[in-house]
Image: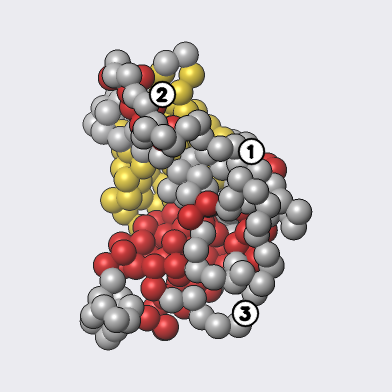
């Protein structure tokens, strides 16, 4: 969060500071179980299978943890594994957040399981999420929806020499039980609108419309193509073309 505040400050020419008394950001560290440590000291225990995963903010919704940082990426995966060692369902907001976390880890099957937990364990017939003692918990509704979107499309921004570069990845965490489908109107960072269709677990085609005229790199599995189009124009992606 502080990283994003500093990035915004640099963009708008505003000097930013961490809250008084907070000190510098502690580094992310890997503990003795291979997990991403929740604390500066290695206090995590395998039996602590609770719903709290705040130390994984850098994986989602942040972008400090990714496949570009393999040590912390695998540490986050291990932390999720250790925090769910029982057969009990994970309910409400903890389930919703985990959908997106597993999606960022490219683990579509685990993301789908947490979605089933959310819908079957704490969702009312009217689709509003319930979490006792409250009549509803909107975080789980919004979070679950965001998690589904992360399973189907992910985007991020990189800044090089002060300029933004955007990446869009299609179907990064598609579970086997969603072999076919289509979406439209998805928004990606950088001002892009995405629609796509898939069948038999593979992408058939996609259309990306640029709203701001920014360049982007489109990724699907091992393919990567860079596009630059004007604002208001669209481009088609055919995974079968070379």
Q: Quadrant of the C terminus?
A: top right
Height in image: 54 above or below 225? below
Q: Nearer the viewer, residue 134 or 150?
A: 134
Nearest to the eye among marks 1 and 2: give it: 1
Closer mark to the observer between disc 2 and disc 3: 3
Nearer the viewer's eye, disc 1 or disc 3?
Answer: 3
- Circle 2/circle 3 CB separation < 8 Å: no
Q: Are marks 1 and 2 in contact (CB under 8 Å)?
A: no
How did the renderer colour the structure? secondary structure
CA separation in Å, label 2 and label 3:
43 Å
The residue indicated by pointer 2 is 164
> Measured from the top left, where is residue 229 in percent x and y?
35, 26
Per the model, the C-alpha gap separating discs 1 and 2 is: 20 Å
Provide the residue designation for mark 1. 69
Which residue does the numbered mark 3 point to in the structure image?
86
Residue 197 appears in the figure:
no
State whether residue 173 is above or below residue 95: above
Taking depth in this image into account, of 123 and 169 the one nearest to the observer is 123
SS state under label 3: loop
Query: Which residue is pictured at 28% across the width and 51% down the height?
Result: 185
Residue 19 drawn above or below residue 125: above
The spot of residue 146 in percent (x, y) is 37, 58
User: In the picture shown, does residue 138 fall above or below 171?
Assistant: below
SS for tag 1?
A: loop
The answer to which of marks 1 and 2 sits earlier in the sequence is: 1
Side of 21 where 47 appears, left or right: right
* Residue toward you, 159 or 53: 53
Q: Secondary structure at mark 2?
A: strand
Q: Residue furthest right?
A: 32
Residue drawn where x is 32% and y is 19% of the image: 15
The 10 Å Cα crowd at callout 2, few under 14, some 14 to 19, many 20 or more, is some
User: Answer yes or no: do the residues labelled 1 and 3 have beta carbons within 8 Å?
Assistant: no
């Amino acid at each position: 969060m502080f990283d994003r505040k500093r990035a915004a400050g640099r963009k708008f020419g505003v000097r930013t500071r961490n809250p008084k008394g907070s000190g510098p950001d502690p580094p992310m560290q890997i503990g003795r179980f291979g997990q991403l440590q929740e604390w500066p000291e290695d206090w995590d225990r395998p039996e602590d299978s609770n719903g709290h995963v705040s130390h994984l903010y850098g994986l989602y919704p942040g972008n400090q943890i990714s496949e570009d940082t393999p040590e912390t990426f695998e540490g986050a995966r291990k932390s999720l594994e250790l925090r769910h060692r029982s057969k009990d369902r994970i309910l409400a907001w903890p389930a919703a957040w985990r959908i997106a976390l597993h999606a960022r880890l490219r683990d579509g099957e685990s993301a789908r399981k947490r979605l089933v937990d959310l819908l079957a364990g704490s969702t009312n017939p009217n689709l509003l999420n319930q979490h006792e003692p409250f009549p509803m918990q909107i975080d789980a509704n919004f979070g679950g929806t965001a998690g589904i979107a992360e399973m189907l499309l992910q985007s991020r921004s990189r800044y090089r020499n002060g300029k933004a570069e955007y990446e869009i990845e299609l179907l990064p965490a598609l579970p086997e039980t969603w072999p076919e489908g289509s979406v439209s109107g998805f928004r990606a960072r950088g001002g892009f609108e995405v629609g796509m269709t898939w069948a038999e677990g593979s992408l058939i085609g996609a259309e990306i419309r640029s709203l701001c005229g920014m360049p982007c790199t489109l990724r699907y599995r091992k393919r990567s193509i860079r596009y630059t189009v004007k604002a208001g124009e669209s481009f088609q992606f055919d995974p079968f073309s070379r």
